[in-house]
Amino acid sequence: MKTVPSAVSAAPTPARSYEKWGRRILATGWWLFIAAFFIAPDKHALRMSFYALVALPAVIWSRTIARETSWRDPLWLSIAATLLFLSLSALWGADAAGSHALRAIKIMAFLMICFLVAKFLSRTGLLSIRHLMGAILALATIVASVNLIQSLRPILSGEESLLEHMRLAGLGQLDNPLLYGGIVGCSALLALCEFFRETRRPRQILLLLVLGLLVLSLVLTMSRGPLIYFFAVAALVAVAYRQHWRRTLVLLLLASATALPILLHPVGQAALQATASRPTYRPAIWSAVMAETRGRELFGQGWRDDQSVKTSSGRFGHSHNFLLGIYRFSGLVGLALFIAMTGLLFYRCARLRRDIAAPLGAWLLYGICLHLTNGRFPVSAPGGDWFFFWLPAALIYGFDRPRVYREAAGEKLP
């Protein structure tokens, strides 16, 4: 005899409704936080978007998230150990007697929440690489288009003349050529990966236009590091998709046809010379960091609020290299933990499907390169620099799950 489930058993329980609403609120908050990297009016707004839209719901639904977390996962243990040690280094820093140690613990908790929420949303099917790539590329395209129009309109109308020292920057919290260059560089790498993966010709053409727009924006920032690292990582992406060598050839031909007229123009030559001749103080900064850490190599000086570095050329805001920043404040122990965690992240990334591994691996590698010449101590409150390391790292941790491979095999999952 055919049984019919009763209305009582079919009705959702309060606990299920509570968890369902939790998943929806967390997913909405996560996507709005991603959007805030592009549209936040200032750093404070970006920070508050994480606190209010991601961290607060994560605390409210912490039991639901905890059930979806594998606490014995070696990658999670490495992440937790690294964040714990780097944060607790504030206990032997210059600000240990104040409230800085408590602030360090709070920042550590926020970073852990970022990883746990990414894992939770991925496990529940509310975070996918396809939607992530689409959202970032759409946001980057809109922001780059608006910035280009606003920057070039006075020049095209004759109100201003094109000068070689002009550098493109974004609006709001992206009002910095280096930060804006890094954001559009990451987005361009995602567009490149999607271009190689796409099989439909109309979408290939669309992605080619998006890639050209983002690379043009990157070039106009006149930021040496983001430019050099972009082309280096893009070459690795082309190697990863070497079976599509014809597309690589098309990209090279288009890039050459676009770059040659610009480089042959007097303004282009002057801009290139001005960019190449800008002074760099990084060797002096790095030498000063090594000198002041001498004698405290094992555990470092301890994380303090003031990260400035004094050199013969003046005082600079931070170490301009996140590995040196770790060595400076947490010593060789902290540096070893961080390098081990990063190596494990790349190992887990390599295990993912290529449509996930290629963009996330390129994103993380590009972000690391940026932090090697413009990074600070990585344990920091939510900000633009999260986009270059902690966000791709959290996404790799989130997508690294057996469910991904079952989906790839076409298995229907609940």
Image: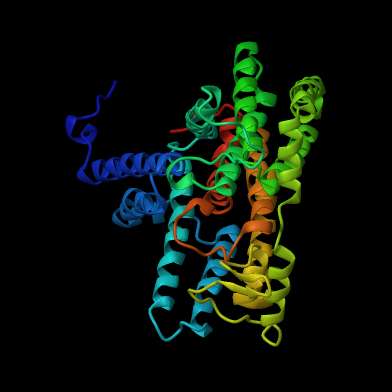
In the image, is residue 40 above or below residue 159? below
Please give left or right for residue 75 compared with residue 15 in the image. right
Q: Position of residue 262 (x, y in %)?
A: 74, 27
Residue lying at the far top in this picture: please name it. 202
Q: Is residue 190 visible?
A: no
Quadrant of the image occupied by residue 272? top right
Q: Count of labels shown?
A: 0
The N terminus - image quarter: top left
Looking at this view, is 124 or 304 the one in front? Answer: 304
Residue 231 image-quadrant placement: top right
Instruction: Report the residue at 66% width, 17% height from top.
Output: 199
Q: Position of residue 126 (x, y in %)?
A: 43, 37
Q: Tell whether 372 sits left or right of 388.
A: right
Render colour scheme:
rainbow
Residue for point 30% across, 40% down: 20
Whether residue 183 sits left or right of residue 340 in the image: it is left
What is the quadrant of the C terminus in the image? top left
Q: Nearer the viewer, residue 159 or 337?
A: 159
Nearest the viewer among 275 and 54 is 275
Which of the 4 image quadrants contains residue 41? top left
Tell me if residue 349 can be seen: yes
Question: Does 253 sit left or right of 390 as displayed?
Answer: right
Residue 265, percent across and down?
A: 76, 27
Q: Nearer the viewer, residue 190 or 15?
A: 190
The image shows residue 97 at horizontal and vertical percentages of 42, 86
